[in-house]
Image: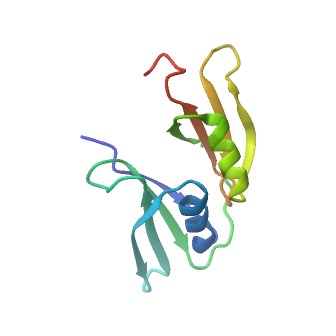
Amino acid sequence: MRILHTMLRVGNLDRSIEFYTKVLGMRVLRRNDYPDGKFTLAFVGYQDEADAAVLELTHNWDTEKYDLGTAYGHIALEVDDAYATCEQVKARGGRVVREAGPMKHGTTVIAFVEDPDGYKIEFIQRGTSGAN
């Protein structure tokens, strides 16, 4: 078994695709409209779906906003340099909500950004945690 994708419901698909592709550097892998169900699915990621887990962005045509709930945490991305990645995100119009730096009570360098729907994305700097 392996993880295939994580699904996020988004209020504006074009805005979300722009964030994940232009701000975070992913690419659109596939996109399908389902007119009978009034929704669109777009899959984005860094690698092909056969090689890595990806994100499924689900846009229900009649819903512009969702409540995130209190159980959802974040998506984590490994980056070479969390400090530089935050600067790139800001230069591309993204929102950094926690600047890069060591995590509280540890040495792992992390940062958080937020997508247009309010989902948090954590950057974990390669080589700074015990998991590498």
The scheme the figure's colours follow is: rainbow
Q: Position of residue 53 (x, y in %)?
A: 37, 48
Is residue 73 among the parts visible in the rendering? no
Query: Residue at (57%, 79%) from the top-left corner?
Result: 61
Query: Residue at (45%, 62%) from the top-left corner?
Result: 27
Relative side of 86 to 5, left or right: right
Q: Quadrant of the N terminus?
A: top left
Is residue 76 among the parts visible in the rendering? yes
Looking at the image, residue 125 lies above or below residue 119: above
Q: Position of residue 80 (x, y in %)?
A: 52, 35
Q: Residue 130 or 120: which is nearer the viewer? A: 130
Looking at the image, residue 61 lies above or below residue 128: below
Relative side of 3 to 75, left or right: left
Query: Residue at (56%, 59%) from the top-left corner?
Result: 20
Looking at the image, residue 91 lies above or below residue 13: above
Q: Residue 76 or 24: which is nearer the viewer? A: 24
Q: How many marks?
A: 0
Q: Position of residue 89 (x, y in %)?
A: 67, 51
Relative side of 38 to 10, left or right: left
Q: Quadrant of the C terminus?
A: top left
Query: Residue at (45%, 20%) from the top-left corner?
Result: 131
Figure quadrant of residue 104: top right
Figure quadrant of residue 22: bottom right
Residue at the limit of the structure toward the top, as seen here: 105
Q: Position of residue 111 (x, y in %)?
A: 66, 35
